[in-house]
Image (tube, rainbow, N blue to C red):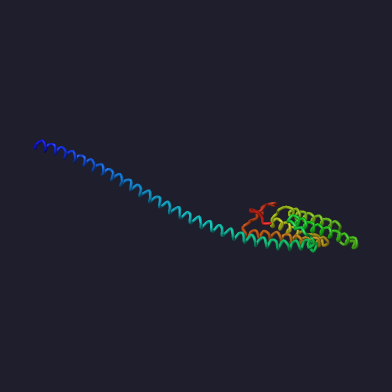
Amino acid sequence: ISALQQGYSQVLCQTLSERNLEITSLKNQGENLRRDNAITSEMVSSLQKDMLAKDEQVQQLKQEVNQLKSENKEKDHQLEALSSRLEHFRSQVIKATYGRAKLFQDKPVSDQQLIEKITQVTEDNISFQQKKWALQKETQPGFCRQEEVTDSIEKLKKALDGCQACMKTSCCSNDLRKEVSFLQHLQVSPPVSGLQKVSLDILHLSLSWLEETEHLLQDVGIQFSSSNKGNQPSSPVVA
């Protein structure tokens, strides 16, 4: 009986020891699982926050894209209106410059051709006025002093050369306006003053066309620089 009790005690002690080891192992596993669960929960929470932030960014980008599309659509409408207004104004300038001769032409007139035509009309009027003055001089001797007329012609020719040089380059309206103002305030004798008036009428037409073009382009955000002659617009010009 004593031997059996001793053997039973040993078995019981061994069993309890194994149970204690098993309990300790399970406790450690439980702690590891709780720690892993806490880490996983933090990661899930962080990922959820990131997803919400990404969703907000996507929504914001969608709104910006829609706004840009709307702005581009509005710009397209403005450019269409600008093209229509430019074409209408340009046709009026062509009609005033070419007269009825343009009605029988099939090919469209380019901007360069129009500028050259305006320059040619100016030069033709200058030539006509010079011939008219020469005729008046021949038919009315002593109409005025020859030196005074010659001096007036030279001053007028210099001013017109400046205007024509400005028109032949890609100048802005401010540059041409300065040349026209200089011509307008130029003091010349009466025979030459008639030529001055005709030239100013033609140049005012060219200046009006250039100013209208710049105003229409500014309506759609295209700005011009007027610091120097030959400056180009800051954005492409609509033809």
- Residue 1 appears left or right of 166: left
Q: Position of residue 24 (x, y in %)?
A: 24, 42
Determine the residue located farthest toward the left in the rendered image.
Answer: 1
Above or below: residue 78 compared with residue 10: below
- Image quadrant assignment for residue 151: bottom right
Query: 220 or 106, which is in the foreground?
Result: 106
Q: Position of residue 193 (x, y in %)?
A: 80, 61
Location of the C terminus (image quadrant): bottom right
Q: Quadrant of residue 208?
A: bottom right
Expressed as whole percent of the image width and height from the top left, the position of residue 85 reads 68, 63
The number of callouts visible is 0
Residue 91 seen: yes
- Which residue is at the front of the view, 103 or 47? 47
Q: Is residue 197 visible?
A: no
Quarter of the rendering occupied by the N terminus: top left
Q: Position of residue 162 (x, y in %)?
A: 75, 54
- As rendered, which of 238 and 44 lies closer to the eye? 44
